[in-house]
Image (cartoon, rainbow, N blue to C red):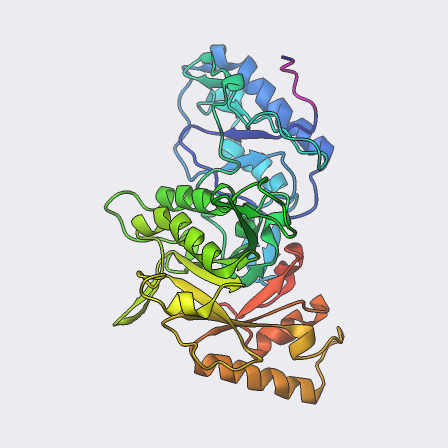
Amino acid sequence: MDRTIPLRTPILLRSVVNVGKDDERSPALHNTKVDKMQQILVTAIALSFSFCHAAPHEKRLSNYISSCGGAWMARDDVRTNNGKVPRRGYLTAVAEFYGGADPHTNGIPGYVYFEVHNKQTSASHTVDAQDAVDKLFTDGALSVLSGSSNVALSPFPLTFTSDVIPVPCHSHNDYTRDVPLYDALSAGCMSVEADVWLYSGNLRVAHTDPGNSGPTIQDLYINPLIALLDAHNPKGGSSNGVYPQNSSQSFVLLIDFKSDGTTTWNAVYSALQPLRDAGYLSYWDASGFMSRPITFVASGNAPLAQAKSSTANPNHDMFMDSRVNESLDGYDTSNTYYSSADFESAITSSGSAPLSSSNQKTLTDQLDAGHAKGFLVRYWDLPSTSLWQELVDAGVDRLNVDDLEAVAGVDFHLS
């Protein structure tokens, strides 16, 4: 197998005392900067045997550099929440990597590893193998780890959200993104949405009927979330969420049931068991709503009767997505978390801001109705990003977004 690394192959550099922390969705990196990072990599390996016993560099906060492009880091330093929250970009990370130390005089950070990605380039092509660690440099030795034997890598370091400030955005059709879940987490979204179809016990994630093929809800969401939360919650520790900057913030996993409601409900309930067993699922009891790192919301064909049933929902940890522009009778905080609507149907199809006075009144009335029931209000099918700020200012609780980069321009009035 050819081990030559092409210019655009994703590479991750990280020091042994470090765990990754920087990321931002943004335009792709410039090739010249990728060259620079590759030079750092080659220099580190070339100098390893000469300097492996050099004085160790001072241990410091975690850092990493990625050439993966916009899914991981912005090229330049950026500011989110309409310029109020700073995030470090790729160029600064390169300049400051390993404290800006020169490996000629400071030795090697500890290890360098490669990530080689197989990309699905067409609908008919199936990825041949998982990402894998191939070689690991540590303690002055280069070890072969048999990447061809599928020593699997997680697509992101498990602490990559450590400097992300969560904002109330909802990643619409999240599974269509380059890196489902992780792109939304990089942008700080508090909520993601996926469509599921039940086939032979498998909960397949797709917008249109995929048949019994394709990724499952476990592949894209449940297993990655468990891995992330386990990393943030050492055994015996507190119940921290996916964002260390606001560890009490619950992350919403909204699943739109596309297949039969009752059978899909039962399958989803079983699929959530690992999150339930770990104590990561929010639930309702006689004391009220008990927030945990993950809050599950069922939408689409999900039946309210199942949410209210002590048989189908014995832990009361699967909540409904009601319709804020329809009757809310039967929905309460014991069974419902979101109250949502198609914006074009419920308010207006006009994409111009500001809203007319009559549309503003309709919006206010619906927000009041949802909030009076204790629900978070969300609208999908927003006609224009120009309306985003007005909706946030009006009190919409979760901004439904397709363009994650545009989220950075919204002032969410974070306290």
Q: Residue at x 76, y 76 (%)?
A: 350
Q: Vertically, is 185 above or below 324? A: above
Compared with 147, 164 (above or below) is below
Classify residue 401 by image quadrant: bottom right
Image coordinates of residue 309 in percent, x first then y, are 35, 67
Q: In which quadrant is the N terminus drawn?
A: top right
Residue at left offset 69%, top offset 74%: 344
Asked whether residue 189 appears in the rendered view, the answer is yes
3 within the magenta span:
yes
- Give the number of callouts: 0
Q: Look at 55% across and 49% down and name the residue there.
A: 186
Magenta stretch: helix, strand or loop mostly: loop
Q: Which residues are magenta?
A: 2-6
Residue nearest the viewer, comparing 360 with 334: 334
x, y percent for residue 82: 61, 64
Asked if 319 appears above or below 272 in the picture, the reply is below
